[in-house]
Amino acid sequence: MATENDVDEADLRETVADALDVDPEALTDEAHFIDDLGVDSLVALELAVTLERTYRVKVAEAEMAQMRRFPDVRDLVRSKLSN
């Protein structure tokens, strides 16, 4: 199982960009998933499933709703892996 220290930010950004079907260059820390990248609820669900499979973490529905920008995802994954 991966640990918090194993999470490479560039790899995570690539994973998130792939799940959201956006260019990794567009996935800046400031880019809002819905407002800037056009992410809908189905794509957000795909992101949660991708994170669960890749990092072996469980993403609750309430946590999914809080993932609005890349730093939110990064912090969530790191938090889950540190527990």
Image: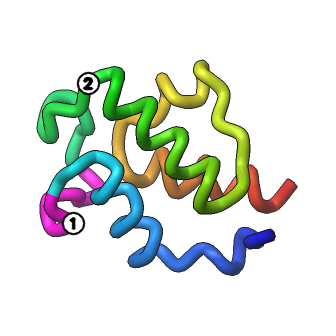
Q: Which residue is mark 1?
A: 24
Q: How far across and down, in percent of the image, does residue 31 sit?
A: 21, 47
Q: Is residue 38 magenta?
A: no
Q: Find residue 46 and report its image quarter.
A: top left
Q: How far across and down, in percent of the image, does residue 13 sit?
A: 37, 66
Residue kind at label 2, given as amino acid type: Asp
Residue 73 sits above or below residue 42 on the image: below
At 72% across and 69% down in the image, what residue appears?
Answer: 4
Is residue 53 toward the left or the right of residue 71 in the image?
right
Q: Nearer the viewer, residue 50 or 9?
A: 50
Is residue 49 toward the left or the right of residue 57 in the image?
left
Secondary structure state at the residue bearing disc 1: helix
Q: Find residue 18 and report its image quarter.
A: bottom left
Q: How far across and down, in percent of the image, does residue 74 sit?
A: 52, 57
Tag 2–tag 1 contact (CB < 8 Å)? no
Image quadrant occupied by the C terminus: bottom right
Secondary structure state at the residue bearing disc 2: loop
At 48% across and 23% down in the image, what residue appears?
Answer: 65
Mark 1 burial class by Cα count in 10 Å: few <14, some 14-19, many 20+? some
Give the spatial CA distance, label 2 vs label 1: 18 Å
Q: Is residue 25 magenta?
A: yes
At 59% across and 21% down in the image, what residue appears?
Answer: 61
Q: Earlier in the sequence, mark 2 or mark 1?
A: 1
Image quadrant occupied by the N terminus: bottom right
Q: Main secondary structure of the magenta part?
A: loop
Q: How far across and down, in percent of the image, does residue 81 sit?
A: 76, 59
Residue kind at label 1, given as amino acid type: Pro
At 34% across and 68% down in the image, what residue appears?
Answer: 14
Q: Which residue is mark 2?
A: 40
Q: Find residue 26 and report its image quarter.
A: bottom left
Q: Nearer the viewer, residue 10 or 41?
A: 41
Q: Which region of the structure is painted magenta?
A: 23-30
